[in-house]
Image (cartoon, grey):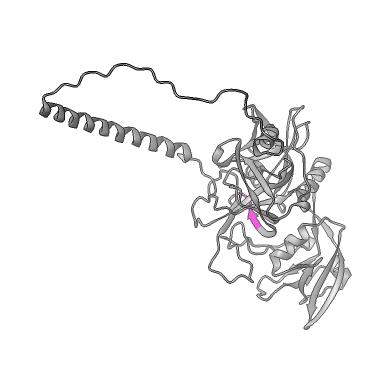
């Protein structure tokens, strides 16, 4: 969508960073349509992404003032015209008799919301959803999150909290308006996941669902604080699964996340990042993380293309962070040729002694499939690997010298915390 994150994975043998969908063009090499939209992190109100100004309230106030001024002028004009007509006719109208008007209104028992309705799901989930304010040394931003455990553990996006990694203040705001200081327990920028801790107990955690069970067309609900509007609820459907998306961290962080995303048309805007994407049973199936936008160089807004980190991946990362303060990222131990324009991902280097080296992968091999999933480019290979865990065995299909080959690779591990 806008930029390409440079660099690689260093000595641990991860592939170099492919072109960004969160910051650069959302178009895998195999796409031919006109330049597509740009994907940007949905949440923090940061310098480039979500600068606070007049915002929506300013717009409403200005509109209100304009309406008041126009109304006053119209009223004065009507009065003058009325006086002219009255003066011309020479007839005085008798004052109307005072009458009392009562309009019909339904009364009775309150509405009963069926279990599984949006209203019922939201009433249960809202106490578990929080807003997160990050105040760094030079910038500030905001996003969303949700409670994982009663003893104060909260999950959010890394790009919501990375402003305060080198110093600053995190404030967690609960649905009842209570504000509590938060601290970062750990984070994995490569998955765009972070865990925050507050000094509170007795919190209401969400119920995590199985993101692998989600199907295209399933109804979903997003809750968060877009543009700082706490407790905002939107709904839609799952538009696609396994969408390869990349999203960057805060401006200048140089951190890029690779997301095997759930795509949704539920409205997601800056400030929604880190909030839950719920299924029809009220279970969290994703963490809202990024949006595609037609905006070019200006603030992004919802066009019905939102992306969420699958709950299964986020759950593994969060469990590791809570247990150890660190988390792992699966790798196959190769570097990829980003200049390659054909179908598949071409290997440029193989780390000696790494997983791919042990499986017989060589420089120049072009990986075309992972566990039956077609690989069109380097980014798709990375997100396909990230949908697994270290230690998983994956089946690779690749070509070498025009010949199709297969290999089984046991995924290695790299630290995700920074």
Question: Residue sitting at 75 percent across and 48 percent down?
Answer: 311
In the rendered view, tell whether residue 172 sits above or below residue 249.
above
Residue 166 visible here: no
Q: Which residues are magenta?
A: 246-250
Foreground of the two, 408 or 106: 106
In the rendered view, tell whether residue 350 sits above or below residue 157.
below
Picture quarter with the N terminus: bottom right
Question: In x, y percent, where is residue 79?
Answer: 21, 28
Q: Main secondary structure of the magenta part?
A: strand
Foreground of the two, 328 or 374: 374
Q: Quadrant of residue 395?
A: bottom right
Foreground of the two, 135 or 282: 282
Question: In x, y percent, where is residue 15?
Answer: 74, 64
Image position of 232 (left or right of 91): right
Question: Residue sitting at 67 percent across and 48 percent down?
Answer: 219
**Does the magenta run of residues contain 248?**
yes
């Amino acid at each position: 969508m806008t930029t390409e994150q440079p660099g690689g994975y260093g000595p641990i043998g991860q592939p170099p960073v492919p072109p960004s969908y969160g910051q650069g063009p959302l178009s895998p090499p195999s796409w031919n349509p006109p330049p597509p939209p740009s994907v940007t992190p949905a949440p923090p109100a940061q310098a480039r992404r979500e600068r606070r100004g007049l915002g929506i309230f300013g717009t409403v106030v200005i509109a209100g003032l304009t309406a008041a001024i126009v109304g006053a002028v119209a009223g004065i004009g009507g009065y003058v015209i009325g006086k002219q007509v009255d003066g011309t006719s020479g007839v005085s109208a008798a004052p109307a008799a005072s009458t009392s008007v009562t309009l019909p209104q339904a009364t009775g028992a309150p509405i009963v919301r069926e279990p599984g309705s949006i209203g019922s799901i939201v009433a249960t989930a809202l106490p578990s959803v929080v807003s997160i304010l990050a105040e760094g040394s030079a910038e500030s931003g905001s996003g969303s999150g949700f409670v994982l455990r009663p003893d104060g553990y909260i999950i959010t996006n890394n790009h919501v909290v990375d402003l305060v990694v080198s110093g600053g203040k995190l404030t967690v705001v609960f649905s009842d308006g209570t504000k509590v200081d938060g601290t970062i327990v750990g984070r994995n920028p490569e998955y765009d996941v972070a865990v925050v801790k507050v000094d509170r107990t007795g919190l209401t955690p969400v119920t995590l669902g199985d993101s692998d069970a989600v199907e295209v067309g399933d109804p979903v609900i997003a809750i968060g604080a877009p543009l700082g509007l706490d407790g905002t609820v939107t709904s839609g459907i799952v538009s696609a699964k396994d969408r390869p998306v990349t999203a960057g961290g805060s401006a200048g962080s140089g951190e890029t996340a690779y997301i095997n995303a759930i795509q949704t048309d539920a409205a997601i805007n800056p400030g929604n990042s880190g909030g839950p994407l719920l299924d029809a049973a009220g279970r969290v199936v994703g963490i809202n993380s990024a949006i595609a936008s037609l905006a070019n160089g200006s603030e992004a807004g919802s066009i019905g293309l939102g992306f969420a980190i699958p709950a299964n991946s986020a759950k593994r990362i969060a469990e590791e962070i809570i247990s150890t303060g660190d988390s792992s990222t699966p790798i196959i131990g190769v570097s990829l040729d980003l200049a390659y324009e054909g179908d598949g991902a071409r290997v440029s280097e193989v780390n000696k002694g790494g997983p791919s080296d042990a499986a017989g992968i060589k420089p120049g091999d072009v990986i075309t499939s992972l566990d039956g999933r077609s690989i069109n480019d380097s980014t798709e290979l990375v997100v396909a690997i990230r949908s697994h865990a270290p230690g998983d065995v994956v089946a690779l299909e690749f070509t070498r010298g025009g010949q199709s080959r297969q290999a089984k690779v046991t995924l290695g591990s790299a630290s995700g915390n920074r």
